[in-house]
């Protein structure tokens, strides 16, 4: 690398360092008293962070005295708030209803197998009663009696379908003799029995209440509303990525104007880790939204590039927290590149051959992103960022002790918050709660690396102006 390239790379790093972080989390309260005064979620986040620090081997500070009691009291309050009829958490209320009501529990179990059961029964019905197949049959009573079966299956009228097949299978008309075996096979199918039972359960008040709670928490999977929500989310993601890429193009234009000779900085969109790359791909990020690479000529007239900036885009600041562990795994894998190797990354802009030595610089240190790896977000900052993520609240509420506590409240009892001690004890030992235990630390790290594209662009321009 010549001195000018080194200078421009350093200028970009300085701009990244100086750019404002409008999405940072505010600090947690200084002590238990302040945590209590800050509300339920802040108190829980404070207690969980204290547990994480102690687990890491640091002795608890005096400010953390009484931390278990703080946690159980706050969790008890979170459960009470989640149970509030109008402003509560419909997902938690649905989970509680499932735990309390055998019919709702059965409905949920059957729902998981319903898509496969529908396919099984519809295929079996179509084999004997599909309109296309019946058109090839001679007109008569047999064809007329089979025709409604297809419509009942298509409409999901499973109880009525079972009744219609039972009636046909019980008749001994010679015209349908060859259909008796397939009709009886459908009638005795466990799939049809489960579907019919599911239809019966949907008539129960408790199951209808459960369905209503599920609809309140968001569109049901597979529904038109869910599809529309998915499209809206994808559109928001595309807008965020477009804003980041536009800023990157302006940054590369500015850097290239400062460099004498041919332009070398360029934007790469949608870089994909090559197949056969060193390391394990399991649960590691493999596609990278946007990057800035600096190309140069290497041996025998070939060209390659150093990766000087790598970014992931998010439509909302909170989305980075759940993405952060996967991002770290992806970076650790990229850092396993051979220093002397060149790797061909496919992208939306064509192939980019990137030098392994620059990929090695992506290794996270102490769980922190390298300075040239960032999140980009163009959403407005939250007025008051929540210290406790939605996923963490859901995990805490789903704990058996939390559900048991909620069941006691629903029965009109007054359980002690000490009954929630099993959740506190599991927090530092149970693998299922490890993401929750580390959620505040993870959110802090992710948000500290998150920039608005406009802020990054302005920071680069200030640094360039300073060097003029």
Image (cartoon, rainbow, N blue to C red):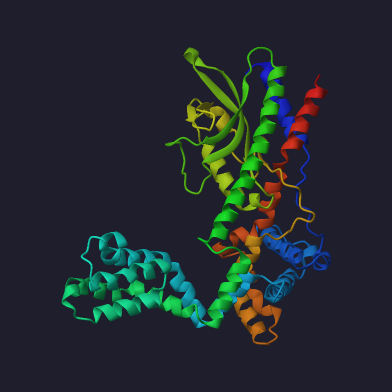
Where residue 96 sits in the image (x, y, percent)? 59, 77
Q: Residue at x 75, y 30 (%)?
A: 14
Where residue 254 sits in the image (x, y, percent)? 72, 23
Left or right: residue 53 compared with residue 296: right
> Residue 295 is drawn in which quadrant?
top right
Left or right: residue 22 compared with residue 240: right
> Residue 312 is drawn in which quadrant?
top right
- In this view, which residue lies farthest toward the bottom? 412
Left or right: residue 134 compared with residue 107: left
Does the image show residue 57? no
Q: Is residue 242 above or below residue 202?
A: above
Q: Is residue 292 above or below residue 311?
A: above
Viewer-nearest residue: 413 or 452: 452
Q: Residue at x 54, y 35 (%)?
A: 271
- In this view, which residue lies farthest toward the front? 139
Viewer-nearest residue: 410 or 463: 410
Does the image show residue 352? yes
Q: Is residue 277 above or below residue 302?
A: below
Tell me the quarter of the image containing the C terminus: top right
Left or right: residue 355 compared with residue 276: right
Where residue 393 sits in the image (x, y, percent)? 65, 65
> Residue 420 is drawn in which quadrant?
bottom right
Where residue 198 sits in the image (x, y, percent)? 44, 76
Tell me the quarter of the image containing the N terminus: top right
Viewer-nearest residue: 447 or 257: 257
């Amino acid at each position: 690398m010549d001195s000018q390239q080194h200078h421009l790379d350093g200028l970009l790093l300085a701009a990244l360092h100086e750019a404002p972080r409008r999405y940072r989390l505010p600090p947690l309260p200084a002590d238990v008293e302040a945590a209590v005064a800050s509300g339920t979620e802040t108190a829980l986040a404070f207690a969980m962070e204290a547990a994480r620090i102690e687990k890491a081997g640091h002795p608890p500070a005096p400010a953390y005295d009484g931390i278990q009691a703080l946690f159980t009291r706050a969790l008890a309050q979170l459960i009470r708030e989640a149970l509030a009829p109008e402003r509560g958490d419909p997902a938690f209320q649905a989970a509680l209803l499932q735990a309390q009501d055998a019919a709702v529990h059965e409905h949920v179990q059957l729902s998981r197998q319903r898509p496969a059961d529908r396919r099984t029964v519809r295929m079996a019905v179509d084999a004997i009663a599909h309109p296309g197949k019946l058109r090839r049959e001679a007109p008569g009573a047999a064809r007329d009696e089979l025709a409604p079966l297809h419509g009942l299956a298509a409409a999901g009228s499973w109880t009525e379908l079972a009744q219609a097949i039972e009636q046909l299978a019980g008749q001994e008309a010679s015209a349908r003799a060859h259909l008796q075996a397939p009709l009886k096979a459908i009638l005795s199918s466990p799939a049809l029995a489960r579907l019919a039972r599911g239809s019966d359960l949907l008539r129960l008040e408790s199951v209808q209440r459960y369905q209503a709670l599920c609809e309140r928490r968001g569109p049901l999977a597979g529904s038109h509303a869910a599809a529309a929500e998915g499209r809206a989310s994808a559109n928001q993601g595309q807008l965020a990525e477009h804003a980041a890429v536009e800023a990157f193009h302006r940054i590369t234009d500015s850097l290239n104007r400062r460099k004498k000779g041919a332009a070398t900085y360029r934007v790469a969109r949608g870089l994909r880790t090559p197949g056969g790359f060193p390391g394990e791909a399991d649960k590691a990020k493999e596609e990278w939204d946007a990057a800035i690479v600096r190309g140069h000529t290497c041996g025998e007239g070939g060209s390659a590039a150093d990766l000087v900036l790598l970014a992931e885009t998010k439509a909302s600041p909170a989305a980075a927290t759940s993405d952060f562990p996967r991002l770290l795994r992806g970076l650790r894998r990229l850092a396993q590149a051979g220093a002397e190797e060149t790797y061909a990354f496919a992208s939306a802009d064509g192939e980019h051959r990137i030098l392994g030595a620059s990929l090695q610089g992506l290794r996270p240190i102490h769980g922190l992103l390298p300075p040239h790896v960032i999140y980009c977000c163009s959403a407005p900052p939250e007025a008051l960022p929540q210290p406790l993520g939605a996923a963490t609240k859901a995990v805490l509420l789903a704990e058996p002790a939390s559900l048991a506590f909620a069941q006691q409240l629903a029965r009109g009892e007054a359980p002690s918050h000490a009954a929630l001690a099993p959740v506190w004890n599991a927090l530092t030992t149970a693998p299922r709660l490890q993401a929750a235990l580390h959620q505040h630390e993870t959110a802090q790290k992710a948000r500290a690396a998150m920039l608005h594209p406009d802020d990054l662009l302005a920071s680069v321009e200030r640094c360039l102006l300073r060097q003029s």
